[in-house]
Image (spheres, rainbow, N blue to C red):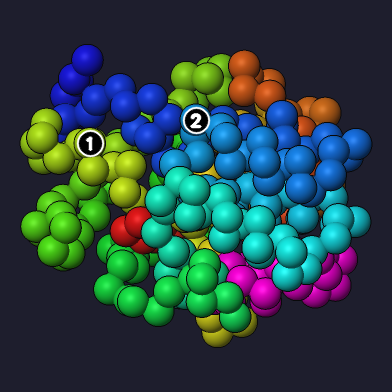
Amino acid sequence: AVVSTQSGHYGRDLGPFSTVALASFSPYVGPWDTLGYIIEILSTSQMVNNLYKLIDGIWLRLRQCDDDTVNESTLEKLVGIKERNGWKSVDYEYVDRLFVVNSGFPKCAKFVGLLKNCNRLVTRRGNTFYASCTEYNSAEEFVEEIFKKDSDLKFWIDNPDFVDISYTLSITAMKGNNPDSSSMRWAASSKEVLNEVSKLQFALERWRDGKWSILPITWCGKPTCVPSRKTWCWGYIWFGVNNDSNFENLIKGNDSLIDWHPYVGIHQGCKYRFVLFVV
């Protein structure tokens, strides 16, 4: 079915690829499962159609369960999956910008470091990175504009494969206490180009300490909040204050939630923006 968005663009139900964030990562984070098993499950999931989504899943897994072993054999497994599926390499810019913290999550940082030096998984071909024209000068502003109101954000893609196509991220905010009423889905200026959304990788970037860092949102599901609306949660990303970040207080939807290691998004001087990579 094709529907018209509030901006007059077209949106189509393309399954998981019409949305900017897939389902919650809950089925993939069991502490009893090995990293190798998680990688195999992700690589055979119908929701994973490129290497970016697989890497995002591993990044999140290591952030949640940092006791897994990460080494060259991990990369060899990813190379095999990439070649088996005919996937393209990940842009170096994406891996280089991935948010890492050595303290507390050393395996996650090690994984990113290994990736950056693997030319069988990462390419420096360039010309695939596009930032949104809108920047949000604080976490509060981001929440107000993205989580609390309906809106349309436009991206222009100047790339030979897309022939100067414009895409719109059409956002429907959560209504009442129902997280499932929210959505973030792609729309385009014509029906014909919507099938190209499967070639787009979407992420959130945060500006802090003089640089932009990517916060993957592939597996963040739908945003939700505590009843006071003062703290919001989008997957592992928290926007709020520590004393209001009780996981048990979050309004639950059909999309399963897990108790992530909280990441508080409010810091003085931070900015936020959405970015696109052409897969």
Q: Are marks 1 and 2 in contact (CB under 8 Å)?
A: no
Say if residue 178 shows up in the picture. yes
The structure residue drawn at horizontal position 78% and vertical position 28%, both measured from the top left corner, is 249
Give the mark toward the camera: 1 or 2.
2
Pick the residue in front: 46 or 153.
Answer: 46
Q: Is residue 159 left or right of residue 72?
A: left
Q: Which residue is mark 1?
A: 195
**Residue 205 marker:** none
Q: Is residue 246 magenta?
A: no
Note whether 43 is above or below 279 in the view shown: above
The structure residue drawn at horizontal position 15% and vertical position 40%, both measured from the top left corner, is 193
Note whether 208 is above or below 74 in the view shown: below
Disc 1 or 2, which lies upstream in sequence? Answer: 2
Q: Residues within 10 Å of mark 1 (few under 14, many from 20)?
A: few
Q: Main secondary structure of the magenta part?
A: helix
Residue 12: quadrant of the picture: top left
Mark 1 residue element:
helix
Pick the residue in front: 151 or 92.
Answer: 92
Q: Which residue is mark 2?
A: 46
Specify the farthest residue to the bottom.
Answer: 210
Residue 201 lies, in percent from the top left, at 40, 52
Quadrant including the N terminus: top left
Q: Is residue 223 left or right of residue 164?
A: right
Amino acid type of the residue that numbered disc 1 sits on in the rendered structure: Asn
Residue 160 lies, in percent from the top left, at 13, 63
Pick the residue in front: 120 or 3.
Answer: 120
Q: Which residues are magenta?
A: 96-116
The structure residue drawn at horizontal position 76% and vertical position 33%, both measured from the top left corner, is 258
Say if residue 271 shows up in the picture. no
Residue 98 lies, in percent from the top left, at 58, 68
